[in-house]
Structures are given as C-alpha cells and as structure tokens.
Amino acid sequence: MSDTPIRSALVTGNSSGLGLGLTRMLMRGGAAVYGLSRSGCPASTTGDVQVDLADDAAIAPAMARLLDGVERLDLVVLNAGLLGNIQSMQEADIRELRQVMDVNVWANKPILDHLLSSGVEVGQIVAISSGASVSGNFGWSGYSISKAALNMFVQLYAHEFPGTPMHSLAPGLIDTAMQEYISQEVDTERFPALKRLQEARGTEVMPDNDTAAQGILNSLERLRTVPTGSFVDLREL
Ligand SMILES: NC(=O)c1ccc[n+]([C@@H]2O[C@H](COP(=O)([O-])OP(=O)(O)OC[C@H]3O[C@@H](n4cnc5c(N)ncnc54)[C@H](OP(=O)(O)O)[C@@H]3O)[C@@H](O)[C@H]2O)c1
C-alpha cells in the first residue's frame, strides 16, 4: 500500500475493470470514494453519479453533484476509457475516432476544470494511459492517438496544478472487458502486435482488476518522485 493513506478519491470509469478494482481496493483501505460512469458502480461507494463522458455538457453538473461538500481528494484517477476498434487508419470511421478522443481525452477537461474552479484540494492525479500511447503498432487506431494526446494533456494541465503531482500512467496489461475484446475479436494474423496480448491472458503478466489496482496504489509514493506532468510506464517505475 502507498505509505500515505488515501482517505478520499475520485475514480472515473468505476463500473468495471480497473476503475472497479481501484474503487474496491480504496474502499477496503477505508477511503471515501467517488466515481463516474454510465452504468454505475456495482460495488459500494461513497458517491456515484451516472453520466456519459462523451457528453461534455453533462460532465460539469455531474461533478458538482458528485462532489457537493467535498473539500479535499487525496487522489484523482482519470481512468474511464474506450478502446474503439482495432483497425487500419484508412478503415477507421472519423466519428468513432472522435468518440474515442471525447471519452479518453476531452472528458477529462471539464473534470479537471471543475476541480480547479471549485477549489477542491487535490493530493495527486493519475491519468490511466497505455503503452499504446508510445508504441504506434498497426491496428491501435484512435486508441493510440487518444492516449498519446492524453499524455500531452496531462503535461499541460500539470502547470495548472502546482503542488499536485500529476502523471499519465501506463498500467500494464489487465484482464478486463478490453482484453476480452482483444482476445476474442482481433485477427492477430492481420494485427500481429496484438498476439502478445492474447498469449498473456490467463498468465501473471495480465493480472485481474483488483490485483492491478493494488499495484497502482502501491506505486503512488514512487510516482510522486517522478517530475510532474510525465508519462510513466508502471512496468519501468
Ligand atoms: N485492460 C488493459 O489491459 C489496459 C491496458 C492499458 C490501459 N488501460 C486503460 O485502463 C482504463 C480502464 O480500462 P479497463 O481495461 O478497465 O476497461 P473497461 O472494463 O472497459 O472499463 C472502462 C470504464 O470506462 C467507463 N467508460 C467508458 N466509456 C464511458 C463513457 N462514455 N462515459 C462514462 N464512462 C465510460 C466504463 O463505464 P460504462 O461503460 O459504465 O460507462 C468503465 O467503467 C482505460 O483508460 C484503458 O485505456 C487498460
């Protein structure tokens, strides 16, 4: 566990996968945990608001409702994300590319802007990025582009959160709905870079969401020693 106990946290995308794991682990550690997603968190939380993060106008009111009366968050995890299709760039529908950008990048703007304008004190911010933000392998399409943009988004917002360590973090492989799609739907003859992911499923290289969440929480102290605004791959931290 992180040396400094987390007493309060916001986790976006808390209804499944890593966000659900983070919520469970933080609640188990005694934190007050607030979250956002479309379908709602199946685990117990302190506050949970359902919102479509592709609908930018809905996000600020959802944040105001979620954090009413909250003065401090020790941790904010910008985790909600969408994989989109594995495909060539030529095949990609521009509306789908825009939707992936909206959820993976732009949804975080009204979230951070609300934290700044409402004066909620924030201890640490982690945006969940991906190795795909820097690898650029064939097929990763809008997902890679959105995660590369997220890295720069974090670098820029870090200037506006002085005193709050802020990083984009590639968490490594996690056995969630995203990996289920990759293992069942993706043709690895055509997209060979994804073969490694299919082979990793069911091995210790691809832990379940609770284990991966605990690994991230354990890394928070070390992450704070890395210059704010940086992209970090958890496997190299
Ligand atoms: N799994 C991996 O191996 C892996 C590796 C590297 C990075 N990541 C990153 O880890 C993060 C979590 O992914 P995951 O693997 O846990 O996937 P997941 O199980 O599909 O979870 C995605 C979460 O994001 C939420 N979300 C998606 N679209 C949304 C929208 N329009 N509005 C509100 N919430 C939305 C989902 O909630 P609703 O559907 O209820 O809205 C869900 O809670 C993502 O940023 C992903 O890119 C995952």
Image: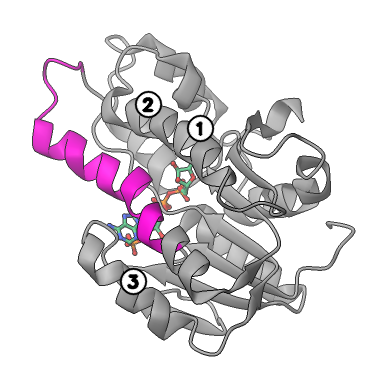
Label 2 environment density (alpha carbons within 10 Å; few <14, some 14–19, many ≥20) = many
- The CA distance from mark 1 to mark 2 is 8 Å
Q: Where is residue 55 in the image (x, y as percent from the top left)?
A: 21, 61
Q: Looking at numbered disc 2 in the image, what kind of residue is underneath it?
A: Ser
Quadrant of residue 120 in the image? Answer: bottom right
Asked if residue 91 lies in the magenta stretch, the reply is yes
Asked if residue 81 lies in the magenta stretch, the reply is no
Q: Looking at numbered disc 3 in the image, what kind of residue is underneath it?
A: Ala
Closer to the N terminus: mark 1 or mark 2? 1
**Element class at badge 3:** helix
**Element class at badge 2:** helix
- The CA distance from mark 3 to mark 2 is 26 Å
Task: Name the residue at 53% across, 44% down.
Answer: 128
Left or right? Give the position of 212 relative to 237: left
Closer to the N terminus: mark 1 or mark 3? 3
Q: Which residue range is magenta in the image?
A: 88-111
Res. 92 mark: none
- The CA distance from mark 1 to mark 3 is 26 Å
Q: Nearer the viewer, mark 1 or mark 3?
A: 3
